[in-house]
Image (tube, grey):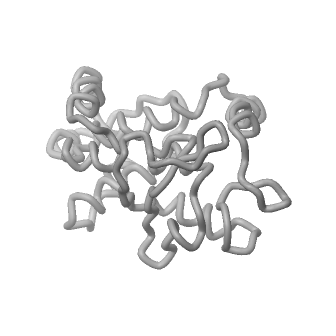
Amino acid sequence: MCLAGEAGLRIGEIRALDWRRDVNLVAATITVNHQTRRGQLTTPKGRTRRTVPMTETLLAALKALDTIRTGFVIRPLDGSGMTDNETKYHCYRLCRAAGLPERGWDNLRHAFGTHAAMFGVNPWKLMLSMGHKRIDETMLYVHFAEAHLRPLPEVILQAQRGHDDPDRRVIAMLGARRLVPRGSHVAANSSSSEESVLI
C-alpha cells in the first residue's frame, strides 16, 4: 500500500519491482524500470524510466520486510512474481481489515498525486514522479488540488519545517499524512495559516 500511496506507483509497476535493480535503501529512492501486466514484463505505462524519492514511512516499511533482498519486492512465498489476479483484490482485503471503505490501488496513486499537488510540488516534477506522458494528465491533479485547497493540519506543517530543498519538504509532508486522523479537517492555527498558502 505504501508503494502506491507514498510513491504513486501503479500496481503493475509494484509487481515488477526488483530489490537489486530498483530499490536503493541508502539513497531512499525507487527506480521504476518495468511493469508486469498479464504476465508480461514491459516498460512502464508512461514508457519512461523514472526515479521516485521515498517517504520515511515507505522507507521504514521496506526495511521492515522480513525477506531476503533479492528478486521481486512483492512476491508470494516461493519468490515468483505475482499475477494480476493475485494483487487485484489485496487492496480491498486490506481496506476491509482496517475498517475502511473498499478502494483499489489507483485510489492510493491518485491520493499521492493530489496530496503532492496540494503540498506545492512543481507540476513538471509531479509529472515525472507519476510517470505521465503529458503535462495535461498531471494538471488534473493540480486543478483538483487548487479547487479543494484548505488549511493544512499542523502536523503536516511541522513535518516540512527544516527542509530547505522543496522536493524533500514535499516528501516529508507526504510522509506525515499518516499522522492526520482519517476524515479530520483540522485547520492549521492562525499563526500557520499564512504558511499553508506559501507551500
Q: Quadrant of residue 71?
A: bottom right
Whether residue 68 is visible: yes
Of residue 148 and residue 17, the one placed in the foreground of this image is 17
Residue pictured at 29% horizontal, 49% vertical: 128
Query: Image check: 195 left or right of 133?
Result: left
Of residue 168 and residue 186, the one placed in the foreground of this image is 168
Report x, y in % for residue 189: 29, 40
Report x, y in % for residue 185: 42, 29
Residue pictured at 19% horizontal, 45% vertical: 124
Residue pictured at 72% horizontal, 42% vertical: 83
Residue pictured at 57% horizontal, 58% vertical: 17
Query: Image check: 116 left or right of 56?
Result: left
Q: Quadrant of residue 168?
A: bottom left
Q: Quadrant of residue 73?
A: bottom right
- Above or below residue 3? Residue 62 is below
Report x, y in % for residue 9: 48, 46
